Image (spheres, rainbow, N blue to C red):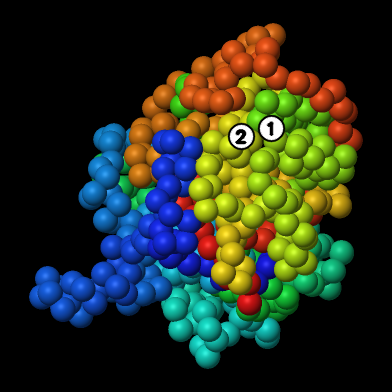
Amino acid sequence: MPCFLKFFFFLVPIWAVIGPLSCDGGRIFSFEMHHRYSDQVKNWSISSGKLSHSDWPDKGSFDYYALLAHRDQILRGRHLSDTDTNSPLIFSDGNSTVRISSLGFLHYTTVQLGTPGMKFMVALDTGSDLFWVPCECSKCAPTQGSAYASDFELSIYDPEVSSTSKKVTCNNLLCAHRNRCPGTFSDCPYSVSYVSAQTSTSGILVEDVLHLKREDKNHESVEAYVTFGCGQVQSGSFLDIAAPNGLFGLGMETISVPSILSKDGLTADSFSMCFGNDGIGRISFGDKGSPYQQETSFNVNPSHPSYNITVTQIRVGTTLIDVDITALFDSGTSFTYMVEPTYTRLLENFHSQVQDKRRQHDSRIPFEYCYDMSPDANASLIPSMSLRMKGGSHFTVYNPIIVISTQGELVYCLAVVKSMELNIIGQNFMTGYRVVFDRERLVLGWEKFNCYDIEDSDTFPVKPHNTSVPPAVAAGLGNNSIADAKKETRDHSQGSVASLSYHRYTSLPFHLRCLVVLFILL
């Protein structure tokens, strides 16, 4: 679980601050953005007589997020197939995910558990395995009286209320802590610790119905029995700034929900997550991607399998840096983390190509290389970035920098943080992609994607990649075109290969390429 930095952000008009800028011309536009269900639009609609108070869902309610998902489908359209038992599964309330800044900058979605169904707003995390919700609480995040509780509906699971709930006993194969059991048929305990301010969860394992539906025209309901944590005691970040209503682990271990759905024959052993520039995303279980996606294979450690891949080259502007590093693709981490010596080589090559003045390091900011943004800021002068994966596929990074406001000044930073133990590809590098975690074929897939345009990806045959021939280079690399290789310099350096064990680091969200996101340091 994450290391959370307590920043707050908002979008503001900075036209007068940095002048009219153009993205196409290498400059940066900024504008004030109001969501269709924001308070500003609400007040305008009601005052103009277009809507009444009763037509507007309470902000943060389950109806609020359900309506967002419904409106997405109406406005953008969905190309849905007829009912197909092999089609992907989504949550009963839809497949939309939302990045929430006030709750650790993680992506959240609504899940429904038990009979009758109870809704929980859970954080999605490919860097951990267990799905847990607050339950029979001895120490849980407050559902009332806190800053976040006033904005969101929070629930507490009660096994006694659900008619389909069943406690998992110590003789169950999913019980990892049998050594702590007083007897074979005792309740199975669990305990998971995360590397973030002594953050942990513990309790007992239970089994109950997770309400899903097919991602097709008929939206056939599916009741999947899953094993999850009845979280009785939480600590650290779970008590205030992250996942107060539960965490949905999406890892490779047998206890994760994707593993259970596949084992029970409900979906293919694969799922996808889409990360939109506006903080809206998608998740689909059983999605195997498209034949047009780029791919690289996972480095599977049998003792602890994870979504770990190999990077063989990093391109920064006109410089190629040869490396041999492994990295974890982690949806629960907002920024990207690199270990030495790759971290220093990456940042020094970035710095050598930046024309703006570097700022003195500010301990409140997690980034080491930050620069003053001049009034005539030109995005084309900021070095572009891409990764070359094992097998030859290219991963263009569309959002490598972030813009910060501190004491009235605008600063941009390379949004890469030094890590002591593990390389992590975070959300900022995944922005603009649909990322496919294909656990059956043990490959990671990615394709540039508009998260509002959902296709019937389950019907696509997946093209097999010849292992002797690298997959084709992704189209649309722009300044990263291979044709420009003759103009490049090359840094032949061999980075250390990180351990395949993993730790969790999470901080902030990614910035939008032609939209300045201002962080106010408090």
- Name the residue: 28% across, 41% down: 78
**Between 85 and 457, which is closer to the camera in this rendering?**
457
What residue did someone put label 2 on? 384
Residue at left 68%, top 12%?
Answer: 486
* Residue 200 rendering spot, x and y as whole percentages: 74, 70
x 52%, y 25%: residue: 478
Label whose residue precedes the other's in the sequence (2 or 1) = 1
Neighbourhood count class around disc 2 (C-alpha, 10 Å): few under 14, some 14–19, many 20 upward: many
Q: Residue 319: where, in percent of width, then height?
A: 72, 26
Residue 397 horizontal/vertical position (percent): 59, 37
Q: Secondary structure at mark 1?
A: strand
Mark 1, other Cα within 10 Å: few <14 / some 14–19 / many ≥20: many
Report x, y in % for residue 180.
Answer: 85, 69
Q: CA distance from mark 2 to mark 1?
A: 6 Å
Q: Which residue is mark 1?
A: 316
Mark 2–mark 1 CB contact (< 8 Å): yes
Reply above or below: 317 against 222: above
Name which residue type carries label 1: Val
* As drawn, 48 above or below 357: below
